[in-house]
Image (cartoon, rainbow, N blue to C red):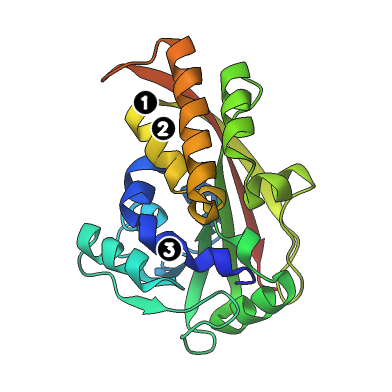
Amino acid sequence: MSDGLSTSFGAEAHNYELGRPDYPFEAVAWMLEPLPADSHRIADVGAGTGKLTRVLAKAPDAQIVAIDPDAEMLATLRGAIPGVPTFVGTAENLPLPDAGLDAVVLGQAWHWVDPVRGSAEVGRVLRDGGVLGLIWNIRDERVDWVRRLTEIMHGSHAEVMLAEGGPEVVPPMGALEEQSWEWVRPITRELLHRMASSRSYVIAASDEEKQRIRRNMDALFDELGLEGDATIDLPYVTRAFRSRKG
């Protein structure tokens, strides 16, 4: 993974786990749809705290390994999903044998990856016909308060990449297909703050900038009347992509 920020999330692993949304099962199933029924060997790369791993584990007979550059994130994953093997590594340097996997998936992670090196390495560990799945949960900024929230927190690497045309893969991976799903997550004021704290820009910000972000978020939430255990529907668009090894 190309940016040192990709290894900074461990310090906020708890906020990441609580603040970030889960992935819609239908979107994950779509990424893996091209695989034969007896394909079970899947690597979740950039697995973080296991948000995507949990969905993958629902598949019958799934054999999953989780890989992330941050050991602290993997420790949280092991606590949440006992029994899933974990390894420190990146999409450009996978600690896995050649042609041993049916699928490699990345949730909220390919934007940290060098697409040329990552495509080559994923192609190395996939069998012929294997699938690369890429997925992101993106807040729907067509809603005014959500757009204002992003302005306060700053846009992420992923949001910029998707706005500029989406992810890139190169041979031996084939052309990307894309689907999207719209949904809402009821969320409290506290969880919105935890979500903000888990973002790379905020993690790397100065204490003064973190305080500014919190003040401005609180002002927005006050305006929305979001207090205590009350929730507001945070709209998301999940964008999923899949590519087969040619």
**Disc nearer the start of the sequence (3/1):** 3
Please tell me which residue is depicted at 43% across the width and 63% down the height of the picture.
47
Name the kind of residue labelled 3 in the image: Ala
Residue type at numbered disc 1: Arg
Residue type at the position of mark 2: Leu
Question: Mark 2: which secondary structure?
Answer: helix
Q: Which residue is mark 3?
A: 47
Binning the other alpha carbons within 10 Å of mark 2 as few (below 14), some (14 to 19) or many (20 upward) gives: many
Report how many numbered discs are placed on residues in the image: 3
Q: Are marks 2 and 1 in contact (CB under 8 Å)?
A: yes
Residue 22 vs residue 57, the one in the foreground: 22
Q: Is residue 26 above or below residue 71?
A: above
Q: Alpha-carbon neighbours of circle 3 within 10 Å: few (<14), some, or many (≥20)?
A: many
Question: Which residue, given by chain and number where applicable, does mark 2 sit on?
Answer: 192
Residue ID at (68%, 80%): 120
Label 2 and label 3: CA atoms lie apart by 21 Å
- What residue is shown with label 1? 189
Q: In the rendered view, does 244 fall on the left or right side of 26? A: right
- For the residue carrying disc 1, how many other residues have a C-alpha within 10 Å: few (<14), some (14-19), or many (20+)? many
Query: Relative to residue 99, is residue 244 drawn left or right?
Result: right
Extreme bottom residue here?
Answer: 97
| Proximity of marks 3 and 1: CB atoms separated by less than 8 Å | no
